[in-house]
Image: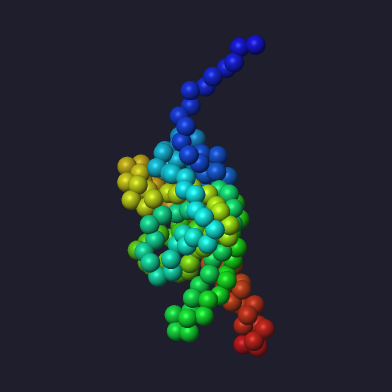
Amino acid sequence: MDEISLDLPMTPGVDLLQRVPLFRTLGFSETMALSGICRIESKPDGAVVLHQDSLGQALYILKEGAAIVRRRDPITGVEKELATLAPGELFGEMSLIDDQLVSADVVTKGPLEVLVIPRREFEKLIASNDKLAIKVYKCFCGALSDRLRKANAKLAEARAKAGG
């Protein structure tokens, strides 16, 4: 039986990008363009991928392994674990759209692999493709809106428990 060969360009993370809700609405060519600026990085156990209060330089999508999100109180210095990230989850996305400092550390929990979308390359890609820019920013707005709704619900719940 003859083998069929498709000469598709191999770019890192196409399949992962298509599974991430933030980029799920992108078409094949848009996903290929985005994956063209991506790279895969391996990190050892205990590595700090993002440092709180530093300027973020990339969006990271967890490919394999786990990571812990923790925030250090600026006054007391006490660290609090906020979340554990699993494969398919992302972090650092705000660094692609604003110039604010990173709000928490992200530390590896065992070895891991991440798909990295560097900020500079992302900005160049978005600047050169209006359709892609609109789709990506619309996805960002949806994701941020969802986070804001969840945060508001948690705040309302906490106020109700506190009696206020």
Residue 147 in sight from this viewpoint = no
Q: How many marks do you count on the picture?
A: 0
Which quarter of the figure is the N terminus placed in? Answer: top right
Q: Name the residue at the bottom extreme.
A: 163
Q: Is residue 40 left or right of residue 101?
A: right
Task: Work out whether residue 110 can be spotted.
Answer: yes
Query: Where, quadrant-wise, is the C terminus in this rendering?
Result: bottom right
Q: Residue at x 32, y 46 (%)?
A: 124
Q: Residue at x 52, y 44 (%)?
A: 17
The residue lying toward the viewer, choosing from 36 and 39, is 39
Residue at the outermost top position? 1
Question: Percent position (x, y) of residue 30?
Answer: 45, 38
Please, is residue 6 above or below residue 117 in the view?
above
Q: Position of residue 21 (x, y in %)?
A: 56, 50
In-front residue for pair 81/34: 81
Instruction: Out of 98 and 115, give the one closest to the viewer.
Output: 115
Q: Tell me what residue is drawn at x 50 percent, y 35 percent.
A: 28
Q: Residue at x 58, y 57 (%)?
A: 110
Give the percent coordinates (x, y) of residue 77.
Answer: 47, 81
Farthest right residue? 161
Residue 2 x %, y %:
61, 12
Q: Is residue 74 above or below residue 8?
A: below
Q: Is residue 40 above or below residue 96?
A: above
The colour mode here is: rainbow
